[in-house]
Image (cartoon, rainbow, N blue to C red):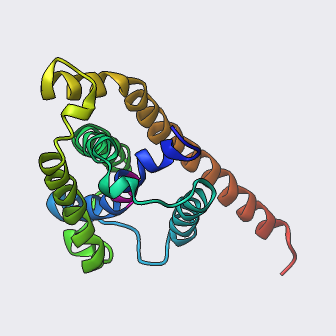
Amino acid sequence: MSYGSHWRFHWLSTLWFGLAASVAAWAGARLFGRSLPSAGSGKALVVAAWSYFVALTIVFGVSVEPFVDPRFIGHQAREILTHGLVTLPLGLGLLAIVEGAVARSDPRLSGPRPSPVRIAGVFAIPIFLAIGVLAADAMAAGQTEGGLAAMVAAHFFEHVLDYVLVGLLVVGGHAFRLGYGSFVVARWAGHRAASPS
């Protein structure tokens, strides 16, 4: 292993996860009749997240390994399989539950549609990795005798604490947002009432 190889081991799958989260949230909102925030809300958080991704890529370096090395391709495919089937739906489902307790709204108000480039990336990255896994015989580089099922099952088990963390972050973040939001509104209302007209 070389400097930054762990980041590059997850580079395409992390890129996919960043693209897929907004596409899945938009699709889920349309499907379940929920609304998403307007285009401008949360923009600072999105910019910060993508800036973090770019900064880590600069710090840990860029190489062709995520695109050509069978170990990298196989690992990234396994990451997408794990997080695409469990982590992403778990996080979005919990968000829908905790937000659903607060409000339900018109499906026509489901926020801005993700860009065609973002939607294409959600499909192109897994297709590229699937072709790479098959063409490069990534299973041989997988270092397991149990086959694909054992390799994927072990990866699901490896991320069990991630699933717990996602749940805690969603519920805790929502509770904090509600509590902090109430505090700010109450403080602002108190300040307005105390100021002379």
What residue sits 49% from the left and 72% below the top? Answer: 41
Q: Position of residue 114 (x, y in %)?
A: 29, 74
Q: Is residue 17 visible?
A: no
Q: Is residue 116 magenta?
A: no
Prevailing secondary structure class for the magenta stretch in the rendered image: helix
Q: Position of residue 161 (x, y in %)?
A: 42, 25
What residue sits 58% from the left and 56% below the top? Answer: 56
Of 163 and 83, nearer the camera is 83
- The residue segment tinted magenta is 14-18
Quadrant position of residue 44: bottom right
Q: Is residue 32 above or below residue 165?
A: below
What residue sits 34% from the left and 51% below the top? Answer: 13
Q: Position of residue 184 (x, y in %)?
A: 69, 57
How many marks on residues?
Answer: 0
Left or right side of 49 for 18: left
Quadrant position of residue 103: bottom left
Of 161 and 174, nearer the camera is 161
Residue furthest to the top = 145
Q: Position of residue 61 (x, y in %)?
A: 56, 58
Quadrant of the rendering where the C terminus is positioned = bottom right
Left or right side of 166 for 25: left
Residue furthest to the right = 196
Q: Is residue 84 above or below residue 148?
A: below
Q: Is residue 90 visible?
A: yes
Of 47 and 185, nearer the camera is 47
